[in-house]
Image (cartoon, grey):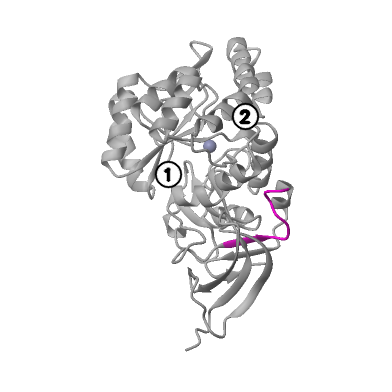
Amino acid sequence: MTAPTALHVRGVALPDDQTRDLWLVGDRITFEPVPGATTVVDGGFLLPGLVDAHCHLGIARGGAPITSLDDARRLARTDRDTGVLALRDAGSPYPYPELDDEPDLPRLARAGRHVAPPRRYLRDIGVEVPAAELSEAVVAQAKAGNGWVKLVGDWIERSVGDLAPAWEADAMTEAVHAAHRAGARVAVHTFDETAVEILVRAGVDSVEHGTGLSLDLVDEMARRRIALVPTMINIATFGGIADRARDKFPRYADHMLALRDGFPEVVRAAHAAGVPIFVGTDAGGGIDHGRAADEMLTLHEQAGMPAEAVLAAASWAARDWLGFPGLVEGGLADLVVYPTDPRVDLRVVRAPQRIVLRGRVLR
Ligand SMILES: [Zn+2]
């Protein structure tokens, strides 16, 4: 029997580092030959697609919520066309569960809205709740997402003139447990030193940004398999944030610069300690979509992560973490193909030769 939709692919599959023949049947990968399949790739290096593990499809350029499903589609396609075939939305003010299985969009792991403290966070983006309502809000947002909750763990406290935790430690710890009981994993935004300690000890699943991490906490994250999504191209914008804040909040401005300057060392230490690190751009708002390659190269060049570790962080390891299996028997039929070995020169990730999403050749 010939399966009319089967595609055949041959190349060096990563991370196995073996020349492989793969067949794509519908949305599945098999190593079993399918007679009559059309060969669409012959040569090059095969990855199961890139992943942007921290972006926002619900936030338009400039920071306002999007206003239609088509806005989310357009942003997701911008990522897709660079080889990002799965993404995690780390908080969306505009719900778009309708897009979870849309055939021409990347795989979606989604949080609901950001859960943030009252009158401190970005306008119109989060659900803003006091400590007494935090756990309830987290459970509601767990239902709005498809597996993730996003907590804003710290932000500027204008009355203090510096970063400060969003809520008291007990409330944040209880909220993490409430999310877990509701079946969701918890991603936390943190820049500051204090909140990240509370949240890592509470057992969150991923630390977003994590500029305030200490070496002790990095070890605890490694031990507990808590992920770090450094978003280094976002941290590079701290200089502008500090400049705009300096007149009113000089202490905050200095703090942000110190966090920025110390960050490559934090990421380097996290990688050395064995913390699972994933590539996230924080696209949406201030950062354009389609920049996963920039984040990958920054992790390599500034934090010293070896190219193969960066590729894992941007592809197969991130997909496993999010539940989107890669180039294995029965895996999902997503592929990105590069003409040369990205482990030798990572810059080739800027120019995929072929992109296959859900068993369909896009390029
Ligand atoms: Zn973000």
State the image coordinates of residue 103 (x, y, percent, origin top left).
Answer: 51, 66
Q: In the rendered structure, which segment of residues is drawn in magenta? A: 335-344
The residue lying toward the viewer, choosing from 248 and 203, is: 203
- Residue identifier under label 1: 111
Placement of 15 over or under 43, stated as above or below = above
Q: Earlier in the sequence, mark 2 or mark 1?
A: 1
Q: Nearer the viewer, mark 2 or mark 1?
A: 2
Q: Residue at x 42, y 40 (%)?
A: 113
| Image x and y of residue 243, in percent | 69, 19
Q: Is mark 2 within 8 Å of ligand 1?
A: no
Q: In the image, which disc is placed on residue 235?
A: 2
Residue at horizontal 59 percent and vertical 10 percent from the top: 251
Q: Is residue 87 visible?
A: no
Confirm whether residue 183 shows in the render. Answer: yes
Is residue 137 placed above or below 118 in the rendered structure? Answer: below
Amino acid found under the numbered disc labelled 1: Ala
Residue 264 percent coordinates (x, y): 63, 27
Image point (47%, 89%), residue name: 1
